Amino acid sequence: MYVPPSRGGRGGAAGGGEQPRVYQVWRGSNEFFLQGRFIFGPDVRSLFLTIFLILAPVLVFCIFVARHLINDFPDHWGVSVMVVVVVFTIYDLTLLLLTSGRDPGIVPRNTHPPEPESIDGGSDMGNGQTPQQLRLPRTKDVFVNGVIVKVKYCDTCMLYRPPRCSHCSICNNCVERFDHHCPWVGQCIGRRNYRFFYMFVFSTTLLCLYVFGFCWVYIVKIRDAENSTIWKAMLKTPASIVLIIYCFICVWFVGGLSVFHFYLMSTNQTTYENFRYRYDRRANPYNRGMVNNFLEIFCTAIPPSKNNFRARVPVDQGLQQTRTPARGFMSPNMGKPVGDLELGRKPVSWDEPRSAADIRDLEVGLGGLLDEKEGRIAHASPDLSLPGELVEGRAGMHSRRSSWGHRSGTSESMDSIAVQMGTEANWGSISSGHGTTSSTH
């Protein structure tokens, strides 16, 4: 269960009141409604556009087409034209809400990174291993139906993503069986809402075909009643012409999407996997046959959400998170621009105050100064041996420089480097003076 630390000003224990709920301190980019009962993506406003694109043509159809067809069928069958389109529209909007307003399968974030593993496979951090040796691997191999699948480490969520999981750069969450982020529903499509997504797209396709077909029925009825041509009958009902054109355009989008996802389901792929991995070039470890693939999508129980958005944030866990030490391990992307490059998210620096490029330039400049100081010492006194403390200081300096790109350049490290440089400069001047005195003698 993901329980983020409480933030100031959000009703924490400091004010003597109740702890905030999880949805109030959620680290993702989601929008919540009805006190965390509904979770949407950050682009939830596009949902209103989708609803309008469904309701508007249905209202036009009911007013200008279905209303005139009520008396054109025997035994009051014309009423069913109006009833079916209204019921089907409500069903379609319900599927839209089930797709957009539920947890798509968000993987809870870790409160701290996983335990690092050393290069030789051990996990003991008390044997003098350096952070470079305890660096977290970028990927891990897991077996799925006898096939090796690589899982990647997510720097944002601080976890190794489960198979078929990916981080959505829009919602800023890792989603199980990530398919894609749909801007039309304002939500990620994942393990817990993919079924409703396909049912929504397919039902929208049927609704377009229904309206398209009965608009032509109405035109034919006008032609037969007035014994005119089809073109003159079309001029009698301009609303039907508009609806026919509108539905014809829409059916290419939603109908094509329905066919494409039908293919994905038959082969047990996701949109993300289809465009990135191309399973037709290698074995798909998730393909269980067409029948079993469809049964997995439509006939298996939807797993419960791993996040209780209405739960209170425990005080002890929030304090524990703020006091957790760094432990001295390395992230796979430490010192590199991080971000989900797979999804086109713009990378950001690991340490915001200092960019990686500035640190590298500073490192090169300091290295040149140190090399210059070393040359002066060697030229002034070739046989001069450095004291043990200074040798240890130089060794520590070199080790710090070697791992500079993997650390976040704190001010303490900068101060220690400056002190060491000053010590070396003083020692160089003393050595120079000593060499001059020796030459005089």
Image (spheres, rainbow, N blue to C red):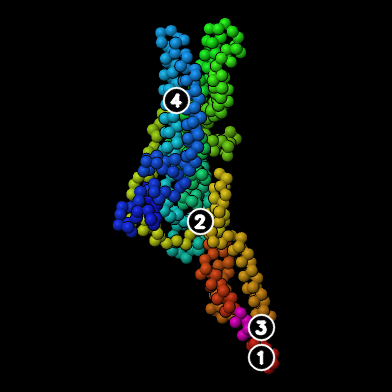
Q: Residue 169: tell me if it is visible.
A: yes
Of callouts 1 and 2, which one flags the residue occurring earlier in the amino acid sequence? 2
Mark 3 residue type: Ser
Q: Judge whether 352 appears above or below 97 on screen.
A: below
Residue drawn at x 53%, y 28% as measured from the top left: 254
At label 1, counting other C-alpha atoms closer than 10 Å, the crowd grade (few under 14, some 14-19, many 20 or more) is: few
The image quarter in which residue 274 lies: top right
Circle 4 residue? 89
Of callouts 2 and 4, which one flags the residue occurring earlier in the amino acid sequence? 4
- Mark in front: 3 vs 1: 1
How far apart, in angstroms, are the residues tagged by discs 3 and 1? 11 Å
The magenta region covers 425-431
Residue drawn at x 56%, y 58% as measured from the top left: 335
Circle 3 residue? 381
Circle 1 residue? 437
Residue drawn at x 55%, y 16% as measured from the top left: 237
How far apart, in angstroms, are the residues tagged by discs 1 and 2? 53 Å
Mark 4 residue type: Thr
Residue drawn at x 66%, y 83% as measured from the top left: 381
Is 382 or 158 nearer to us in this picture? 158
